[in-house]
Every structure is written in C-alpha cells, then in structure tokens.
Amino acid sequence: MKELLSGNEAAARGAFEAGVLVASAYPGTPSTEILENLASYKEVYSEWAPNEKVAVEVVVGASIAGARSIAAMKHVGLNVAADPMFTFSYLGVNGGCVIVTADDPGMHSSQNEQDNRYYARHSKLPLIEPSDSQETKDFMIKSFEISEKFDVPVLFRMTTRLCHSKSIVELGERKEVGVKTYSRNIPKFVATPAACRVHHAELEEKLKKLEEYAQTCDLNTTILNNSDIGVITSGISFQYAREVFGDTVSYLKLGFTFPLPRKLISDFCSKFKTIYVIEELEPYLETEIKAMGINVIGKEKIPLTGELSPQVIRKAFLNEEPQYNKPTPERVVARPPILCAGCPHRGIFFELSKRKDTVITGDIGCYTLGSADPLNAMDTVICMGAGISAAHGFAKAFAKTDRKTKIFGVVGDSTFFHSGITSLIDIVYNKSNVTVIILDNRITGMTGHQENPGTGYTLMGDKTDIIDIEQIVKAIGVKHVSVINPNQLKQVREVLDEYSALEEPSVIIAKYPCALKKLRLEEKQSFNIKPSKYVVDPSKCKKCRMCLKIGCPAISFNEETGSSIDENQCIGCSVCSQVCSFGAITKVGE
Amino acid sequence: MIMTETTSILFAGVGGQGIVLTSKILSSALIQAGYDVKMSEVHGMAQRGGSVTTQVRFGKKVFSPIIGKGEADILVAFEKIEAMRYVDYLKLKGKLIANDFKIPSAPIFSAKVKYPRGIFADLEGKVYTKRVHAAEAAKELGNMKVQNIIILGVLAKVLGLNNLDWKSSIKKEVKPEFFDLNLKAFEAGYYM
C-alpha cells in the first residue's frame, strides 16, 4: 500500500516495521511527530522523557536489555543527550539502537543551525542520511540491522525539509524480532576506565569494518550520466542537486556518511574532470574528501549559512537567477509570531514590562515571545534551563558591583522538568537573590501540545500521577513560593512587589492553561474556566492606547473609533479590561 | 492550463486558516490520479499567528519538495498581504488565486501602520490574478472556517485537471460530519 508520509511519519513507520519495542524522546521541532506517530502503534512502548539525555539513557537501557529501541530529538537536544551517546558508542548494543537527530537548517524554529553530522565523527557512530520519505523508512530498517550487525548504536540524521515534507511511501509489514536474551556482562556494559580502554580499540576496529561495508552497501548509490562533472551529495541536498542538474551530471549519493566510503569516493572522483560537493551548512563531506587529496568545489560556491535550495545551487554553479515580480514594499506588512489571544503568559510579561531596573532571563518556548514588541520584557534567551541558571550568574556578577537590579528568571513548565530543576538547586544552595517565575500553562505548548510530567497523562494516553512543581520547589528549599493566576494582574503585581523586596530566592508559579489547550473537564472545573468575551464600549474609550501595550492580537485600534476586540479571537482572559483605566472594556453580558 | 514537467503550487496565509488541510486534499487527489507528489510544510512558530506557507509539487517524478522565488505556477493566497508578500514566488506567467480577505498583523492592530490599500490593483498589474471572495461565500454557507475549501474549489477550476477525484479526497481528509458542508464549499468555489 502507498501513502503520502512526512519524513517524520516515515521514520516512525520504519522503526515500527523494524520491530522496535521501546521509544523515548523529548518534543522539539522538527522531530516531534516521530514519537507522536510511533505512539499510534500499540506494539511499541512510546514515551515523552523529561529531556533528551533521559530519552537516550532509556533507549540505551532497553537496547542492553535486548529490545530494538529508538530515541528522537531536535539537533540542540542532542547536545543535552551527548553524554550517554559518547559512551554508549564504546559499549555497543544488544538490541539494535537508533538515535535520530532532526537538524534545522535555516532555523525555522530553533536558536542555532548546528550541523550534527559532526557528532557522528566525534562520538564514532555510523551516520545515516536519507533524502526523502521512502528512504527514511527503508534506511531506518537498515539502521537497526547495521546496529546489530556491527554492535554499535546508529546516528540517523534528518533535516526540517525532510521531516516536514511528504512524499510517497510503500508501506511494509512489521517484522517482530522480540527481545534478545540479556545476561549480566560486566566487561561489556560497565564503562570502567579499564573496560573502555579495550572498547575504544574495539570501536576503531568496528569503524574499519563499517567503512568496508559502506563501500558496497546500497545506502550509497552512483548515478552515472555522460558528463564531465561528478556531484557528491547526501540527504535532502541530493534532491535539490537532482532538480537543478537533472541528467547533465553524474552523482555519488551518499546515504551512509560516517565512516565515509573513501575508496568508493576516490573511484567516483577519478571518472570526472570536475567534482562538486553539494551539502547544506558545514563542509562536512568536503573537508573529508579534500583530506583524501582530491580537489573538489563546494563551500567556495555554496553558503555556509542558511537553508540550501535548488535556487541557491542554480545561482552558485550555473549563475542563473530566476525572474519574478517583486512585491511592492509599502504593501507588505511584517507578520511576526506573537503570544496568542488569551495566552496566560501575557499578564506576567505585561507586569514585568512595567517594572524599572530589572533583568529578565528567558528560556525556550512560546514565552520567548515575551521579548517581542510591545512587551519587550526579556534580556536573554540561550537554551533550555538557562532561564534559571543565567539569572543566578547575573546575580553573582552584579553582587561584585553596587548594582541593585532585580533579577527574574523565567521558564516554562515542561522546560522546568527538562533542565530547570538542577538550575534552581544552584540558586538555592549557592544563595542568590533571584525570583524564578515558572509559567505553568499545563502543557508543552510551543511544539504543539505534548504531555509533560505536570499534565497527568502519558504520550500513550494513560493517566498517571502529576509531578507537582510546587512540591519540588519547596523540597529544594525555596522558602517563598506562590502559586498565582497570571490573568489576575493585581495578584501578579503584588507578588512581584513582595518578592522584589526579599534578599533570598523566591519562586512564582503562574499556573493557568494554554489558551489553545483542549481542556479536560477537571481542568475547566479546577481553573473555573467558562467561555466568555470582552467588548469595548466606544463611548467610554478615550483612545489612550493603554490596551495596546499588552500586545493582544484580538485588539485592534482605529484613530477615529478607538479600540475594538475581535469576538472570534477573544477567549475572555480579561487582561485588557484590567489595564483600561476608563472602564471601557467589559465582559459581554455584564 | 498547460503543465510543464513538474507543477509547483505555493499556498500562503496565516496560521489557523486551514492551509495544511487544503494542501493535503490537493495532494491526496493528485496521488490518486497517479502523479508523483511532494508536499512541504513548516511547523513551529506558525501557530502563534505568523505567516504560513505550504508547497505542493507534482508531476511524473518530483525531486525537490520546495519552491523558490520565480518558480511557482500557481500561488494560492488566503489573505491579501500574504498574496503580496509571496508574489515573487510566482513565475512571470504564473497565476495568482487570492482571497479578498484581511487579517491584521501585529504592527497593524497595534496602530503602528495601517492595513495597506490598493493591493489587488497592484497585484493585477504584476500577474494574472483571480480574486476570490471566499468570506462572503463562507458566510452564505454559515461557517467562516470553510473559506479554505472554497478557495480549493477555485484552484481546482484553475488547475483544470479532469482526472482528479476531488470528492473522494475531501471525504478522506475531513471529518464525516463536515463532509457535506465542505463539498458544498468546494462546489461554491469551483463555480465561482
């Protein structure tokens, strides 16, 4: 049967058909749908782990226990998970194990565009790079075979355009492989220095065998045309190159890119006058091929930054530029992402934006948009967890001066579980006067509503016990903890004032569900949420524009008539009515 | 219309307008008719009211899933500013299907700039433009959310491929309780 599948759906399908039994991940664009799709196959145990390091450690354990297992994450997630991966490569597997890295060239939804192919070289793992959905499914199955045959975990690299592009896939049947026998094997699986000195040497031998395998395996293919030019490429870049050059060049399309099949490459290169290496982001292939003494053309023509495309290749190699009609600049207005109408983060950032002499260290999630106009209430965003730990660093640096700036660290609920807890321990144990604000919107919002340890449900839909953020914070030793409703601005202001006057750590838990979340009955009841709308009374509106300062997309302003609220967008959070000094905004029906 | 080897259709709009569903119905109909199809979308920030695009390419054999500037045969814009923003993706002889519908963005609703005037007259001077009043038709059908399927109906007409079974693709992609409404919406667009 044929279906149109995204790369992520195909990765999940491949893992399913390969007989995977255990899957773990932390959501992150563009990787999220891999586990969401795996969870639809009841034969596979699938879970959201609190972070990527935990996810990889879970699948390491499952692999050693004998089950085929898979972990998936976005590129920056692999930074978090690098620790177990670098040692697991030494130990080797029992059941086959695949780690998926979904890179984001062009940074569609990421804070950097690191090229994770280098991780394969660095951690000495075989690297597989598919170029469309069919290959993603086929290569995934192959990856499990390679993992077991060579006794190594496999790094499987995808990119945004592969993850989120759909193409036709021929579906196959699941092959049950069961759980292999496990018995204690201390020299193999206990990573002591003595054992790992042996393992490192063994791994180097495995890599030699893997390179031999790569010379002939069908993951690497050659397409010969009558041409003077040979193109070496991998992943989605192959599709772009093929689009541009068609049958006018020959191709060495690499699907197995570490260890590189050096003989295959030099044989290919010997057939052509000119060799182009076409790859997105870093000169990963180019550097290796040049080190073999082969002269190739690559990054001198193709940019190191941003997403590759047929257009970029066409301009670089053929000097062809497309013809088109340009938009009229004065008729195009930017459409930046903003906090949604009714977003519970708005109240916190609005109150923070009004305070003078503050530092607000932010974190990764929808609430990064607290940095956007008109709120502009953020100083830094780095990575998950830094919203808390960087605040501690600010506090310790300012302590060396006479600066009295109040420091707030802002983090989301899922991010707090991911890597905020250890950061908060640092603040408490090493005593810094920071107020941490945990924006607990009862879901992992940014990636499209995944469950997390605070929501009470698992990825597979089972009910489980909620991990209570307030209790964790108290157990760490924070003496000043308040749980507030962020839509109640007076409450927000009062607690910010109170905690700003303290000389020791404090935590505010702003607890209110995401405006887009499909609420369960118990949530509607516990937060007392009833659908309502707010409306502006034009006779009372003084056109002061105060309500525009909260940056709500449901409110628009007209010089003649003042503010108005789009009833289709308003969900009744009431924040605008609280900022209006003239009582012009009221609840419909009151 | 005359098809080059691979046909490229770019959909542009605002998060929440149903662009992904529209592209899915189109892709599903194309696959059923035996074309090779690639469809590309980008997730993430789009849900927060940002500008959204999806791209559908079909033909005998499709390589790249993405469409660059000057490469689209058809641009389907669900909102006026978005039509202007992405008009450079159209080939010089490409066709624009644009919804006569305004969604203000942050600089507009915060009264920093006004919603631009004269977009359609400007676009008509640049490219072949098919202006669609999907909001009015949707209002008549009693559900503003079906604007996307009305626009799909217009696209079906412009594409002119008589080998596509639109009805069964709509049936496949929408919830059963909304099938009749969506079919009416499609027909409203097709005969617009």
Image: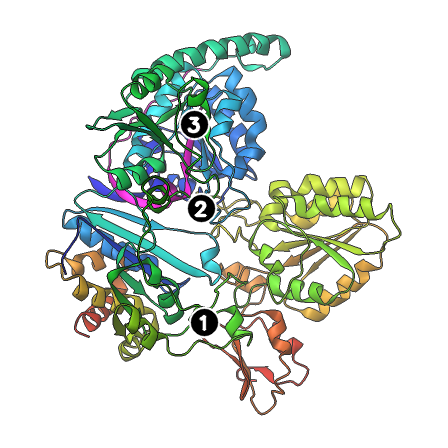
Element class at badge 3? helix
Q: Position of residue B121 (x, y in %)?
A: 32, 77
Q: Is residue A355 left or right of residue B112?
A: right
Q: Position of residue A188 (x, y in %)?
A: 53, 11
Element class at badge 2? loop
Label 1 marks a residue whose chain is A
Q: Which residue is mark 3?
A: A286
Q: Which residue is mark 2?
A: A461
Where residue A339 sits, quadrant-wise, is bottom right
Q: Nearer the viewer, mark 3 or mark 2?
A: 3
Q: Which residues are magenta?
A: A153-181
C-alpha separation, residue under disc 1 versus residue under disc 2: 49 Å
Where residue A252 sits, quadrant-wise, is top left
Label number found at residue A330: 1
Say if A589 sits above or below A66 in the image: below
> Is the N terminus of chain A in the top left, top right, bottom left or bottom right quadrant?
top left
Kind of residue sitting beneath label 3: Glu
Kind of residue sitting beneath label 1: Glu
Q: Is residue A341 left or right of residue A347?
A: left
Say if A539 sits above or below A310 in the image: below
Q: Position of residue A247 (x, y in %)?
A: 21, 35
C-alpha separation, residue under disc 3 versus residue under disc 2: 46 Å
Q: Is residue A169 magenta?
A: yes
The front one of A522 and A388 is A388
